[in-house]
Amino acid sequence: MPSFTRSAWERPAETLCVSDRCREIALIRRTHGIADWEKSKTGNTTTTQSVAEVHSHAERENEANRQVRIGAIMADTVGFFTDTTVCIGCKACQVACHQWNDLKNGKGRLSLPVVSGVTLPKLSGDSYDNTGGFSDLNWRHVKFVEQISEDRKNIAWLMMSDVCKHCVNAPCLEVCPTSAILRTEFDTVFINEPACNGCRDCVSACPFGVIHMSTDPEKLVAQKCTFCYDRLQNGLQPACSQACPTQSIQFGKVADLKKKAEKRVEQLHDQGVTKAALYGADDKVLGGLNSFYLLLDRPETYGLPSNPKVPSRNVWMSSLFSIMTAFLTGLGVLFAFREGRRPTLPTQTPTSTTPEGKA
Amino acid sequence: MNPFVVSPDWHWWIIFYFFLGGLSAGVYLIAALIDLVGSEEDRPLARLGYRLAFPLIGVCGILLIVDLERPDRFWHMMFQSEVVHEALEDGDLTLLRYAPLLKWWSPMSIGAWALGLFGACTFLSFFMTFWPVRFLGDTWFGHLFRLGGSGMGFFVASYTGVLLSATNQPIWSISDWIAPLFLTSAASTSISVLLLLGRGVSSETRERLEKADLWALSLELFFFLIFLASLGNLLPSALRTAEGIILVFGTLVIGLLIPLALHLSPGRVNSARYMTAAFAALIGGFLLRYGIVMVAPALLELLAPDEPRELARKLDEITDIPLFFSGTGAVLILAAIILAGAIPLLLRSHWHLAARQTAFAGVLALLMLIGVFFYSLQPLAERRNATLFRSPEDHRERGGGVGASLFNRPDVVRLRSKFNQAK
């Protein structure tokens, strides 16, 4: 068995689990996957039998695992639909994220006041949002967008639980030179920490300001939402969506979520909330966002760019201009120094052959 | 313009890398070109260039590694770490053939390889300068090596600009002209270094070098003006930051106008004047790198405290109104018109250019002017979108090659997971 073909991505995976229930869920997910795969291969429509059959065959489970890994069959693309209209700003999602991922309290790189050796939480002072933003310790961030009337008598909040968008054309994944950022079998974007060397190119590329470098001296790598990859692998939904009490964060297959979202927008429009619109549900924003939003105002109000772009858009043009510049610069040097090859240089009067011929 | 990004904290290490990397690439490419076409009496200059390039790029390598959060993992830039680990653990070194990692669409990935190759070129050239015979002589392989070496120099001098453009940071990602600017600046600063250090070269060689310097400075000036115009209506905002002022005026005045004025002003040309010009160009080249790297985080900080609706209004102003209609735009266009007229004429008188050669310089100046007008009149919102080029990740199947692939990961991704703790 040992050879490179079975290595890394082809070797059957161990199943991570804590309970029989987890294992059961994971198995069912995979067996459904393999059933569909078999169907597409043979055209056989009676696939239900394979679920029971596979149960008794651990090898088939491993094979399914392998097929998911190498992309021969896909686990469903999963994502979040965040309906900001029902977000109450309770931050349960933030707490759940901290708890599951063992994130420490604090603001990461933002400096915090220390009194008698105890780091105090810092109040923003101008908002009820005291988290401030994403950091290496805050992979979820509930935004409180305070909207104060002109006469400053009324205040309204827009609330939104923000997270990594797991973009279809993910800018961070695109630029990562170490291949530490990868697309998982669930179509989510994941940072494989042992491979990251902390070059911070992904930080500069992310149009949403999601990625931050870890302050933990033992890690010092890029940090962001993992979409609870470990939970997905074990058939559980991410911690945040499970914790959300108002179903503002909904987890599911992206295709299903989009249908739900469209219905919800229709409903809101019927109720007269004409500003309600989806952000990232279509492919206009970075080819689509697997974590998309229903917003009640323009994206900028929520701190989201209305037209985020992939970094590679500039590579061709910049390169083209550089080649042109290289040609022009080289021309100058060549012109200046070719003169030296001429046998005599009585005066500075140039002959018309050299530069024009080159140009 | 996207103010919602986070700065990657590329600071002094990177600024010095950009500057010294540009110098190294510049001196090497000039040395290689001189070696390729220059006469025997120019050889000492080429030798000086070769001797400078290798130590400089060595320093650059250290700067880059130190800048990483995990310097011990610097080799991950070029090799798939998980594959290497597996090969070592299994003791099967043949697996290493799967390890090399190159993402051609990621400037940092391609730059890492280019630096390696360039390092090898400079290393060879450096040591061969101590050999009594000219390295590879006049053979076709020698010419090819010099041509390739200068090509690597051009690449290393400019890819850093492409790297900055291939992000989503303000200023960096808005202009496509950072790379050309870095390239011409690398040429002008490296010529300055050669002028300053090449005291032993013949006066004819020095004169040729000064001509090349004049050419590089003029090109850099043109590209700098286009670069400023290409920032659109973000330019006035950039000028509200100290870093923006350093970028614009530091580069323009110290790095370009002072050296050009010293070169082109009438009167006897003496060495003190050229030395001053060279020093000014070097400082200007550094300020250019400093300004470009630091203006992006400064702009983010400038826009951060705005209330959401106020910020949205400002963003509309920046993206929808062309630079042409602002005071800054008017000044820029006026400066561009004056310089587009003056530079070819001054070159003509100083370089004793023939009519056709002056016309060539004039065409370049005209192209610059067209560029400045084009960018000044076009609002940022109308810039081409991501749709012009398909993202390499677009519609890529999971597991379909480097980038999207699951290749560079262990069998089981060991997260700090409750599942693992339970085990």
Image (spheres, helix red, strand yellow):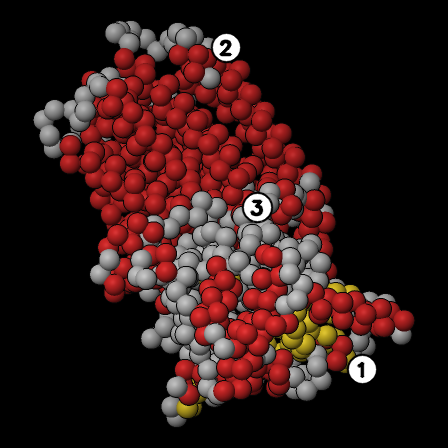
Residue sitting at 27 percent across and 59 percent down?
A: B87
B55 or B326: nearer the viewer:
B55
Q: Which mark is residue B355?
A: 2
In the image, residue A23 sits, relative to residue B232, either above or below, namely: below
Q: Position of residue B344 (x, y in %)?
A: 50, 21
The residue tagged 3 is A313
Residue at image mark 1: A153
**Secondary element at image label 1:** loop
Left or right of residue B214: residue A69: right
Horizontal side, residue A260 vs residue B360: left or right: right
Residue density around tag 1, few if under 14, some if 14–19, many if 20 or more, within 10 Å: few
Whether the residues at callouts 1 and 2 have beta carbons within 8 Å, the answer is no
Percent x, y for residue A166? 58, 64
Residue pushed farthest bottom? A116
- Residue type, mark 1 in image: Lys
Spatial CA span between label 3 and label 1: 45 Å
Chain to which mark 1 belongs: A
Residue B99 percent across, percent down from the top left: 33, 53
Image vertical order of residue A122 relative to residue A202, above or below: below
